[in-house]
Image: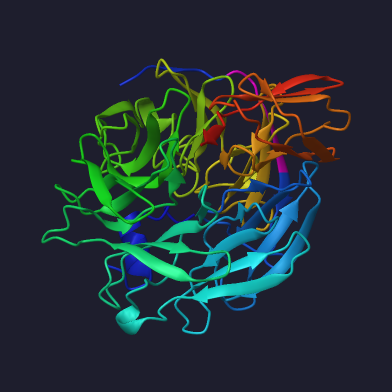
Amino acid sequence: MRRPISWRTILTRFALVAATTVAAPAQKYTTLVSFNGADGANPEFAALVQGRDRDFYGTTRGAGGNVPGTVFKVTAEGTMTTLADLGLDQPYAGLVLATDGWFYGTTAQGGANTWGTIFKMSSKGTLRPLYSFCAQPNCSDGVFPLFGLVQASNGNFYGTTPASAAVGNPGTIFQITPGGKLTTLYTFCAQTGCPDGEGPSGPLIQATNGHLYGTTGAGGAHGYGTVFGITIRGKLTTLHSFNGTDGSGPSLGLIQAADGNFYGTTQQGGANNSCVSGCGTVFKMNPKGVLKTIYSFCSLASCTDGSDPISGLVQAPDGNFYGTTAESGNIGACGGHGCGTIFKLTSEHVLTTLYTFCSQTNCSDGAGPQAGLLQATDGTFYGVTTEGGTSSAGTVFSLSMDLEPFVTFVQRSVEVGKTAEILGQCLIGASKVSFNGTPAHHFAVNSETYLTATVPAGATTGYVTVTTPRGTLTSNVQFRVIR
């Protein structure tokens, strides 16, 4: 098994420049799909996304030659359908479900200029190209978009391109409209020495204040990467520069947790040097940029707690954080690096290893997860591994923790009087939808798994509840009401 890709290796590939740990209880882990090459191979940073139909959608980057990059959907029971063959265009990132019902994504190669694309796709697999990168002089619009998009409350999409020595571009942040008009909001390394960061290292998120937040894998005051915030008009603020001890090479983006703080991972750095450059960390940062390392990986002998947490985190309704590491766990497997883990981290910073990959013969259960987890509205976690499986081409898996079902949103921020889209299950017969206690006077149940509701006057930011014949479902995150 190859080692997981560091952000500096990613840039090179395209010619680019303390806590305690406890033993895990038994969990129900299921391998749903083993990719075989013909149906795709090697899902990289492509976390799954839940559709309106309750199925899960994702991408595989492929392996060149006769192994194409693909877009697929898979049911909770493991029935997979290949929706689109993207050939050699290599979609590294996952998809985002937009408010128009289409999925939007990126490819790292291909397009009119061969430097990558943005596309949209229907749930049936109809593909429409939106933008081909390097369309502007000197590729000032960026190249090789490796990471996914986020749809902001204004309806536009935002994303990043990594640094590229090939065209002398240190990475960008861009806005693109649903119609395909792209605007470069920010170009990194705007100052000597790149104190503002270099090489964005994951997707952006929109926080409750309406601003966008993300990370760079390099640059900053010490050269180990940064956390930044940026307005939708393009004003960037560097919030934190990593120094190695507190982490190095922040990984696939951030989440804003229920406490209002941001949480993320770094692939390297931290308190433990068993992995040469450090084994990675989990960090917490407040909106002002004050950062604290809350866990350093490889805290146990032989790194059985994992190392190289490339993927980001997800916070479940139980308040705990869940994620994956790409290496260690079983140090004897995968060339002596270990094949990775799934972990839980409590708010008290206690880490539990929930599953160790390559626990089955020939790694048929998967190896090397490099994408984040999706917690579906049934409460179960779903994810992908880049390698392993019966054909060594990666897998789709589920992990049941017996957590309660919930509802979630296509878009977390909507204006009063506008339509909020809500995903769930067993929604038929729903009798009430409330926004932080204020009932919606108009809502429509479109299917067992999808309803829409008009945000009522008087509604405030908070949790949404849906009353169904089987009980009341509460949203996993707060809904932001825009006035």
- Location of residue 79 in the rendering, given as x and y in whole percent from the top left corner: 81, 50
Q: How many marks?
A: 0
Q: Is residue 337 visible?
A: no
Q: Which residue lies at the image location 52% right of the left edge and 78% below the top edge?
A: 110
Q: Is residue 27 magenta?
A: yes
- Location of residue 425 in the rendering, given as x and y in whole percent from the top left corner: 79, 33
What color scheme is it?
A: rainbow
Q: Which residue lies at the image location 70% right of the left edge and 55% below the top edge?
A: 101
Q: Which residue lies at the image location 79% right of the left edge and 39% below the top edge?
A: 449
On screen, residue 12 versus residue 405, left or right, reads left
Residue at the extreme left: 192
- Location of residue 166 in the rendering, given as x and y in whole percent from the top left corner: 30, 78
Q: Is residue 177 magenta?
A: no
Nearer-the-camera pick, 432 or 259: 432
Q: Which residue lies at the image location 45% right of the left edge and 45% below the top edge?
A: 205
Compared to 147, does 452 lie above or below? above
Q: Is residue 305 visible?
A: yes
On screen, residue 33 versus residue 194, left or right, reads right
On screen, residue 471 versus residue 301, left or right, reads right
Q: Where does the magenta region start and end?
A: 25-31
Compared to 292, does 240 lie above or below? below
Compared to 321, does 11 lie above or below? below
The picture quadrant where one finds residue 452 is top right
Nearer-the-camera pick, 181 or 129: 181
Nearer-the-camera pick, 77 or 67: 77
On screen, residue 446 versus residue 131, left or right, reads right
The picture quadrant where one finds residue 284 is top left
- Location of residue 359 in the rendering, given as x and y in whole percent from the top left corner: 60, 37
Compared to 483, does 476 lie above or below? above
